[in-house]
Amino acid sequence: MSPPRISTAFNFHQQLPLNTNRTCRGSSMATQNGTTLIISLVILITITFSAVTAMQRSTLQVRMVGNMQHQQNVFNTAQNDLSSLIDQLRDSDNADNLLNKAIQAERQATGSTIDPFGLGGLVKPPAPQNIKPSTNKLRAVSLPADIPQALKTIEGSSASTVAPYHFANKTEVMDTNNGLKSTQEVGFYYLAPAPYL
């Protein structure tokens, strides 16, 4: 006896009825005019312009900060020269000799200056990169008056008095592009024996 046969044949070509009651919102695919694309492009262009503007502003700010740092380096170099000169005059045995040269230059011509690092045996601080070596001008500002101030002028006295000698050092520092310049001046006095006339 043979087993019973089960029919497994289906009609795959059977068409299902379409629901024709549905309606599409908006216009049909053939008549769309691309408004979504245009709106998307406008938004994309707006975002691009705002990003480019932000990048330009940040680049400008980076340049400004770099320029301020360079300007500060020029200022600090001049300040370093002045500090180094005062420190070396205070600690050096050459101070008397150097300041005497400044006094002699002032007596020869009023307003004459000398280079303290070139004549006095003092060590000039090195200039940083992108900054020219500084120029220093040391001058005697005021000397004791031409009246006798020493106690030796008093009969029977062998003591001498001290008098202040006033000096000024002017330092000029420029960058290698000659775009930035810092000019600073420091004044100081030196107590030395009063002139004996």
Image: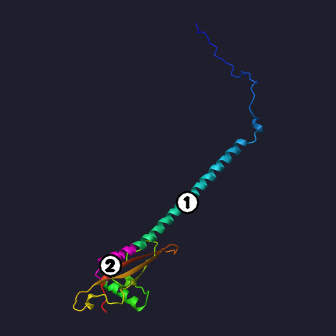
Which residue is more in the foreground, 171 or 160? 160
Residue at 42% x, 73% y is 78
Identified by mark 2, the residue type is Leu
Q: Give, as a single range, the part of the protein colored magenta.
A: 80-95
Q: How crowded is mark 2: few (under 14 residues within 10 Å), some or many (20 or more)?
A: some
Tell whether position 83 is magenta.
Answer: yes
Q: Nearer the viewer, residue 115 or 196?
A: 196
At 67% from the left and 18% from the top, the residue drawn is 10
For mark 2, give the secondary structure. Answer: helix
Q: Please, which colouring scheme is shown?
A: rainbow
Q: Which of 66 and 145 is in front in this view?
A: 145
Can you name the residue that lies furthest to the top here?
1
Q: Position of residue 195 (x, y in %)?
A: 31, 89
Relative vertical location of residue 81 with respect to residue 143 in this rendering, above or below: above
Image quadrant where residue 82 sits? bottom left
Residue 175 on the magenta span: no
Which label number is shown at residue 59?
A: 1
- Residue that numbered label 2 is attached to: 89
**Circle nearer the N terminus (2, 1):** 1
Q: What residue type is labelled 1?
A: Thr
**Residue 117 in the image, given as x and y percentages of width and height:** 37, 81
Q: Identify the secondary structure beneath mark 1.
A: helix
The location of residue 84, given as percent across then percent down, is 36, 75
Single out the residue that lies furthest toward the front: 155
Judged by its main secondary structure, the magenta piece is helix
